[in-house]
Amino acid sequence: MAQVTLRGNPCNLAGTMPKVGDTAPDFQLTGADMAPITKASLAGKKKVIVTVPSLDTPVCQVETRKFNEQAAALGDNVVVVIASADLPFAAKRFCTTEGIANVKPLSTFRDKGFKQAYGVDITSGPLAGVTARAVVVL
């Protein structure tokens, strides 16, 4: 079982992160408008999936702002998504307030299998139930 740390304390992860060359698992995350966003609905684009625990934390906010800045230079053939356990309303509010328009905030709250399929399911410690910080490029 893989581990990440929170302030030096280990937290266990469940699932398996896709490896280079693997076919990425399907997913159905929820967009800011409550519509499902799937791997298939993003077909034809290169995908950068950034998982964070919550947009309500300072580190996740900084990370999202930075990816938003960088995404502007990637062109129309690339979509950058920020996947978190936040409800779509909260993610939308953060992005609107911060002027974040180049990344797509998505929620894992309906697709419980996403976290395990992408190896980012925190199963122990104070953040159990949210996604670990990771970047996956498809």
Image (tube, helix red, strand yellow):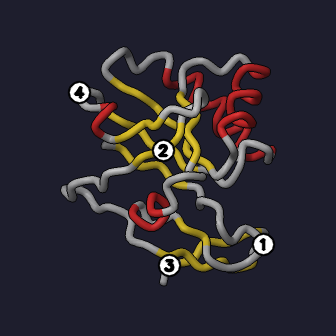
Q: Are marks 4 and 2 in contact (CB under 8 Å)?
A: no
Q: Quadrant of residue 131?
A: bottom right
Camera-near label (4 vs 2) is 2
Q: Position of residue 42 (x, y in %)?
A: 33, 31
Q: CA distance from mark 1 to mark 2?
A: 23 Å
Q: Secondary structure at mark 4?
A: loop
What amino acid is at disc 3?
Ala
Q: Position of residue 133 (x, y in %)?
A: 59, 56
- Mark 4 burial class by Cα count in 10 Å: few <14, some 14-19, many 20+: few
Q: Secondary structure at mark 2?
A: strand
* Labels 1 and 2 touching (C-beta < 8 A): no
- Against 20, is 44 above or below? above
Residue 44: which numbered mark, if any?
4
Q: Is residue 52 left or right of residue 46?
A: right
Q: CA distance from mark 1 to mark 3?
A: 16 Å
Closer mark to the observer between disc 3 and disc 4: 4
| Mark 2, residue position | 29
From the image, state whether disc 2 or disc 3 is nearer to you: 2
Q: Earlier in the sequence, mark 3 or mark 4?
A: 3
Return the disc, 4 or 1, that comes first in the chain's sequence: 4
- Label 1 belongs to which residue? 126
Residue at horizontal 54%, vertical 20%? 102
The residue tagged 3 is 2
Q: Earlier in the sequence, mark 4 or mark 2?
A: 2
Instruction: Tell me which numbered mark, 2 or 3, is placed earlier along the sequence.
Output: 3
- Dots 1 and 3: beta carbons under 8 Å? no
